[in-house]
Amino acid sequence: MELILHHFDISPFAEKVRLALGLKGLAWRSVEIPFVMPKPDLTALTGGYRKTPVLQIGADIYCDTQCIARELEARFPAQRTLFPGGSEGICLTLSAWSDGQFFRPGAGLSMGTNEGLPEAILQDRRAFFNFLDFSTLDTQLPHLYAGFGAQLQLLDTMLADGRPYILGDAPSWADILGYFPVWMCRGNIRDGAALLTRYTGIAAWEQRVQAFGHGERTDLDAESALAIARDAESIVVADVSVTHLPGLQQGSAVTVTPEDYGSVPVAGELVRLTGRDIAIRRTDSRAGEVVVHFPRAGYRVESV
């Protein structure tokens, strides 16, 4: 079954998945999605999930990069691992740092240091980035630079002993987590390249992570991706075993919502709810019956 990544090229989070595909040496199909809402073709698959990217494998739709990384590892165990030496827990714990304290000031700088951004982009990101106060963004820039620089210093310290990768001799998902804000800094933040020159431990490591590449990419149009979903059947294994929520069971009507930002609920029928993951089944006139997958950590499940 083909790997189909719904993304846009300047997305830092999509760069994480592209690098994972490169590290594992995988072929994949690229569906370019709009930078701002609305995204009707993607919504047909996800039910409204707001973040980028989304990985489609047949009728299974994987949201959130930590969910995507786990699925790639599970489906392609013979390819180079993302989690060497049993490091999955460490790597996924690092995502709370990279996706939060590291990414957020970088996102603020991306918005605040680029003059003349179209109003459509600003309006979209005001709704999306609820952790930024756009009305005071200009005055917050020194604090954002300081906060982002502090995270770059932490990354530099991780590499200060000359190790080739964050966890040692082997590349891992941890390197991708540390790298994507650096990639964002270099490409999306004014004077970002100059800012990076202060951190000597990062430079050679950055080139090693770039060398992961993006795997074998070929383009696919959105209508073809929807047709693939319609013609496929999910391989989800039903399991509602760790709920902590009285009354929830397989088949319950629920919503799943990110707890940090981009908090648009996705509604469906509960299929999986474990300590690791959530899956809901939903039907769309264009995509047919699909199962949408989320990680358990960072997502809220509620009855409807």
Image: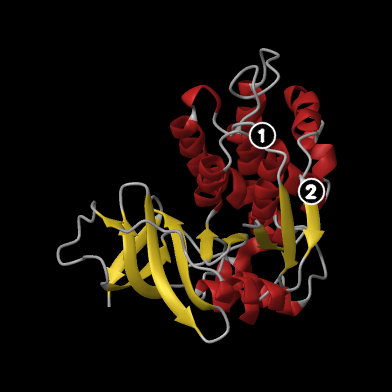
Q: Residue at x 74, y 78 (%)?
A: 119
| Numbered disc 1: secondary structure | helix
Q: Establish if 164 lies above or below 300.
A: above
Give the spatial CA distance, label 1 vs label 2. Answer: 30 Å
| Numbered disc 2: secondary structure | strand
Please state the horizontal and vertical placement of residue 98, each as a whole percent of the image: 57, 42
Comparing 178 with 195, the one in front is 178
- Residue type, numbered disc 2: Glu
Q: Establish if 55 lies above or below 252.
A: above
- Tag of residue 234: none
Comparing 27 with 85, the one in front is 27
- Residue type, numbered disc 1: Leu
Q: Quadrant of the N terminus?
A: bottom right
Q: Residue at x 84, y 38 (%)?
A: 194
Q: Residues within 10 Å of mark 2 (few under 14, many from 20)?
A: some
Q: Establish if 285 lies above or below 189.
A: below
**Image side of residue 191 versus residue 62, left or right:** right
Q: Residues within 10 Å of mark 1 (few under 14, many from 20)?
A: many
Residue under label 2, please give it.
216
Asked whether residue 283 appears in the rendered view, the answer is yes
**Image side of residue 17 versus residue 209, left or right:** left
Please state the horizontal and vertical placement of residue 227, each as a whole percent of the image: 64, 76
- Tag of residue 152: 1
**Image side of residue 225 versus residue 69, left or right:** right
Q: Residue 38: which quarter of the image?
A: bottom right
Instruction: Name the N-terminal-most of marks 1 and 2.
Output: 1
Please state the horizontal and vertical placement of residue 153, each as a whole percent of the image: 65, 29
